[in-house]
Image (cartoon, rainbow, N blue to C red):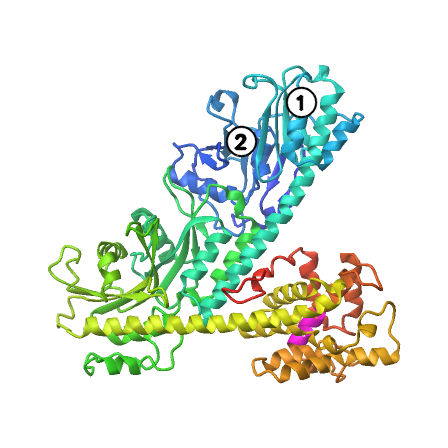
Amino acid sequence: MESDHEAGRGSTRRLGAAPEESPVESGAAPCPIPPVRLRLGVDGDLELHPETPPLARQAAYTRLSGVPLQALLAARWGVAQHLLPPTRLQADVTVTEHAILTTAPQEQAGQDGHWLVLSWMPDAPVTGPAAPAPRSVPVPPDVLDWAHLTPEDALSAAGVLLREAGVAQIELTDGVSLYQLIVGDGPAPASEHHLLLGSLAEPLGRITLSVPLSVVPDTVHAAAWMLGQVCRQALLSSEVRRKEHAALRGTDLQRAVLSVVSGDAPPEAAIYAASRLVHAQAGTRVTTHYPSAIAEAYGGWLTDDLRRQVAARLIDGGDARPVFAATPADHAPVLIVPLPIQGVRRGAWVFQLSRRPWFLRPHVLDALLEAARHPVHMHGAWSPPAGIVASEERAPRSVLGLLQHLVDLDAPSAVAAQGLHYLTPVGSGAWGAYLAVRITSDDGSGGGAVILSSILRTGSDHDHPPPSAVQAVVAAFWHTVGRAGGLSLSAPHPLLGALQKRLSLAPVRAAGTGRVTGVLLVGNGPEDARTDAQLPTLLAVLAQQVGQAAERQLALRQLSRTREQTFRVLGRVLEYRSYETKGHTDRVTSMALQLGLRLDLTTDQLTVLRWGAYLHDIGKIGITDAVLHKDGPLDDRERREMHEHVIIGEALLREQDLVPEGVLEIVRSHHERWDGGGYPDGLRGDGIPLLARVFSVVDVYDALTSARTYKPSWTQEQSLSELARLSGQALDPVLTRVFSDMVRRGDLSEGAGGALLSPPGVSAD
């Protein structure tokens, strides 16, 4: 369960930050925001009443962010929930410390579902009391057998047993879904008699009775207790799966950001990964030029009102925490995540979320905010690269001049940026853009909507047309652009605005397939009325260069994939000689990379660490089976032979030109000790290479927690105690403390590093 969900006493629970962490100043007067009615829809989504005003919707989404499903259901079952402002988001417009989520009074519930009420006044009435818990009774053996069932199967078994026992309806949850069963024929009758599954601190379900509680047989109480146990176990399992899943997607986001930094991926790769992390339906980047209030973005789901809200938020600055937008009743919630300010440029990630606020748990928001803080998200599109001089008097543009500006560039986005800056010199009134293009529902017949996402832009913001105008041009001429080498428009033309005199487009094609994946655009505003006959040709040449750069990058990725797979296969060869170490390579690789990320290692260091983890024990191929598989301790001769494996491994790999020096250091030095008593060189303290020290910590931990022929597996606490004993002796004390803290907080997961076992495009399976 989430650590910041605090259970209160009586029939209420408190959810959110501790009072001392609340960003709301004490004594602040509450805003006149009306109570919000909400319910869980038949599809599991959270529905706010259609008459809820936009500001109230904004406040409700803020307060409900990260609140687990079982808390919403608890309010439905009569256990009121006190919601504190989440510290990771901006304070909502209610400016109140407390909000109370209760079940709606009977006269407001209506016939169309179970409505809840989110009230902003601290003295809001709390409906209750909550239903009593089942009394302690002997549990029949056939009911005890439910312990091995899923909540859904246990519910079915309970329905058969309790059909004639005065039970009308059963509801329960595993934290992921709500399960309901109506016992008997017809709808469940309205009743004031209930039994609560679980406890007031952790409600897990409710049984609605058709008879008073006093006449209910013991079988009902036994079944209620057992159903609570089944749900509690399922809830714990679902929480573990949820955290592992979020950790995996958080790692995907970190990898995407690193790929953007290295130029291996465009900016939308990070936005796409962030959208998956928060379960968003759509995501985009919105930018503005301070102090302008005009927001620039591509994305058909962005309304004009939403653009204005985002622009106002960016111009306002101040609180850099995410904030929910005020959206109409028929819109999904929208989250605005500010990006680092870069001079006069300001930007934000904007996500159209699902209507399931429990996805925004604290650890998910932490991963999102950590990724959003990287300055790369506002780089590349806003300043001319080195060598481009602002001057109105320039030599005529030519193919040779263009190609000279593209020398020594590898990444497609870098080629496009340099080329567009050459074609749109500062002060000329010209602008350029490189857009990624995706076609939805394209069955090959030429249909489908055109979706654009901005990779980079050049030129003055004043000269750029609105994104909607560019979207219209590209969509209208998509098939012409796709078949031809390019397209040029000149005013007057219905698709060119009053401020646009000329517009040229050129498609960027994927290597091999020829499929159009992007579009380069150059436009000329009123300040540049000169006719440039060469512009379409130059733009087509640039598009070809961008496509070729993408093809080279693909070839390098395929080479990297081959090398990656070779290293991993070599690292796992030993596992087939010694079955007891099966899975060791992947486990230590995953844990080493998670520790490396916590230590803020660079991309290159993480790559070396990954390869070193693959190959750290490759030298054991040269160790005899009698020593490698011996049960019990080794004698002096055997120990000397075993120590040779690090030297053998380094020698084998040094013959391969593709193995970096850092990998050789890990292979040779991962058995060195902090106190100097290790092998083969007796290195001490900081004299041991950093990555070898990082890997040693996780290698020792995995050896402790794994079973061997000479010992059983140790528990987590036993292993952490041994790490503490070895800290400062065999292991780097600082790295050991960081790793141990990760384990204790549950931040370490075997599955979480799976996405880091290989570079983008390489499967870890």
**Is 34 inside the magenta-drawn segment?**
no
The label shown at residue 572 is none
Residue 625 image point, x, y percent:
80, 73
Q: Earlier in the sequence, mark 2 or mark 1?
A: 2
Residue 260 falls in which quadrant of the image?
bottom left
Could you tell whether 215 is left or right of 718 in the image?
left
Residue 539 falls in which quadrant of the image?
bottom left
Task: List the residue tagged with mark 2.
Answer: 124
Could you tell whether 49 is left or right of 289 in the image?
right
The magenta segment = 691-697
Q: Main secondary structure of the magenta part?
A: helix
Q: Nearer the viewer, residue 192 or 661?
A: 661
Q: How many marks?
A: 2
Residue 247 image point, x, y percent:
58, 55
Q: Disc 1 residue type?
A: Val
Give the foreground label among 2 and 1.
Answer: 1
Asked whether the viewer can see residue 94, the reply is no
Q: Nearer the viewer, residue 326 or 2?
A: 2
Indicate the secondary structure of the residue bearing disc 2: loop
Q: Nearer the viewer, residue 609 or 32?
A: 609
Residue 76 image point, x, y percent:
56, 30
Q: Disc 2 residue type?
A: Ala
The CA span between labels 2 and 1 is 41 Å
Task: List the residue tagged with mark 1.
Answer: 160
